[in-house]
Amino acid sequence: MDLTRRNTFGMKVSCACYVEYDSLEDLFSLDLDGLPQPVFHMGAGSNLLFTRDWPGTVLHSCIKFLRPMGLEEDEVLVEVGAGAVFDSFVEWACSRGLWGAENLSLIPGEVGAAAVQNIGAYGVEAGDIIVRVNCFDRETREMVTFENADCRYGYRSSFFKEEGKGRYIITSVLFRLSRKYSPKLEYGGIRAALGGRQPMLPDDVRRAVSEIRRAKLPDPSETGSAGSFFKNPVISREHFERIEAEAGPDVRVPHFDTPEGVKVPAAWMIERCGLKGAQLGGAAVYDKQPLVIVNLTGQAAPEEVLALEQRIIAAVKERFGVELHPEVEHI
Ligand SMILES: Cc1cc2nc3c(=O)[nH]c(=O)nc-3n(C[C@H](O)[C@H](O)[C@H](O)COP(=O)(O)OP(=O)(O)OC[C@H]3O[C@@H](n4cnc5c(N)ncnc54)[C@H](O)[C@@H]3O)c2cc1C
């Protein structure tokens, strides 16, 4: 089965077997061990770099329900099927005046993966609004529920990405939204995009976030990518001060203080290495946001993306002494 249209990078790869299920009963009835191995569960393929054909089975959820579960004072609980498009849930919430998900507008992918990745943007992470995650345990073939604390959410990380990887298939996620006016406008130019106006509704923030994203990020339907290719590194304060000293007094090195150290945007370092727009075969560093590697020609081969990735890692290491790590999962 051809996977070219099932990964947003547009890598021309295939898998031996592709299986979709659209209900829990369907999933329970599958003999996963009897399918060509290994079995990989994917979402919309928007955080993946397929480096070669997948020799086994690709499994995909089409469980797409959205079910409001009732009110708790100002809060609304909503359960959403893992195969639903995450942005459809955000749009639904915003259109009903419910706060909490609006800063996550327009992030590609599905609800199950959002809970795996702890997707984040503009100061909000999925983990902030997730109450619990329902899963099918591949080992015991039973349903298991993870409360938010059990999911161990961190920066683009979770239990499902680490110890639980491969074992748990997320079937649905319970979100908590709020009817109380609670916009989060501190990050990433949202206030500027609002033109100084105070947002009245979640939809106002959604529009502002969408505007910023459209200006900065490639539209997967036009240009292949998997979004931010690298994680932003966190370094020690001494290391940061060395980078600042080397940059000189006229350059402001962007950074954010975190409990673990100083986070420096990888995009800034890649640009300072002169790699913004750099091309290698069909792959290129996106000219509007150097954190993104794009399939510029639509014909990029996995080897070209991997070679460009290595070139960026080596250049940043040599110039700043910082090791970049990919955010995109290599398959
Ligand atoms: C243009 C662009 C912009 C982006 N912007 C952002 C951003 O602002 N913030 C951000 O955080 N990310 C961003 N991303 C990355 C991507 O959108 C997210 O990582 C998203 O959650 C991936 O969802 P997916 O459905 O495509 O999952 P996939 O990429 O298919 O899979 C991701 C992981 O989730 C696992 N998985 C998928 N479904 C399930 C399931 N039901 N059960 C168990 N495991 C599962 C897969 O095995 C894999 O490990 C961007 C990507 C693109 C292309």
Image (cartoon, rainbow, N blue to C red):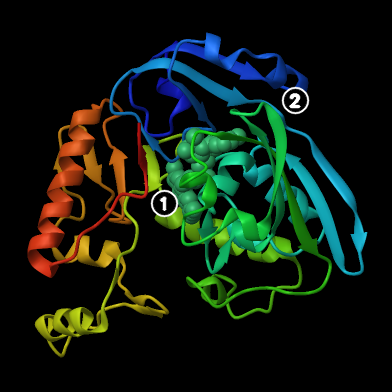
Most foreground residue, 58 or 121: 58
| Image label count | 2
Name the spot of residue 8 as percent of width and height, x first. 43, 33
Q: Which mark is residue 280?
A: none
Examine the rendered structure and indicate whether residue 271 appears above or below residue 59: below
Most foreground residue, 39 or 319: 39
- Say whether disc 1 or disc 2 marks the residue closer to the N-terminus: 2
Most foreground residue, 149 or 203: 149
Q: Residue at x 12, y 47 (%)?
A: 311
CA gap, disc 1 and disc 2: 35 Å
Q: Residue at x 83, y 55 (%)?
A: 77
Name the spot of residue 121 as percent of width and height, x first. 52, 61
In the image, 139: left or right of 236? right
Crowd class of label 1 (few under 14; some 14 to 19; many from 20; radius 10 Å): some
> Disc 1 or disc 2, which is closer to the eye?
2
Name the spot of residue 209 as percent of width and height, x first. 56, 61
Quarter of the image for the C terminus: give it: top left
Q: Residue at x 70, y 63 (%)?
A: 100
Name the spot of residue 62 as percent of width and height, x first. 67, 26
Q: Quadrant of residue 302?
A: top left
> Which residue position holds label 2?
24
Residue type (three-letter) at the residue carrying disc 1: Leu
Residue type (three-letter) at the residue carrying disc 2: Leu
Q: Residue furthest bottom?
A: 249
- Is disc 1's CB within 8 Å of ligand 1? yes
In the image, 306: left or right of 166? left
> Which residue position holds label 1?
217
Crowd class of label 2 (few under 14; some 14 to 19; many from 20; radius 10 Å): some
Q: Quadrant of residue 248?
A: bottom left
Quarter of the image for the N terminus: give it: top left
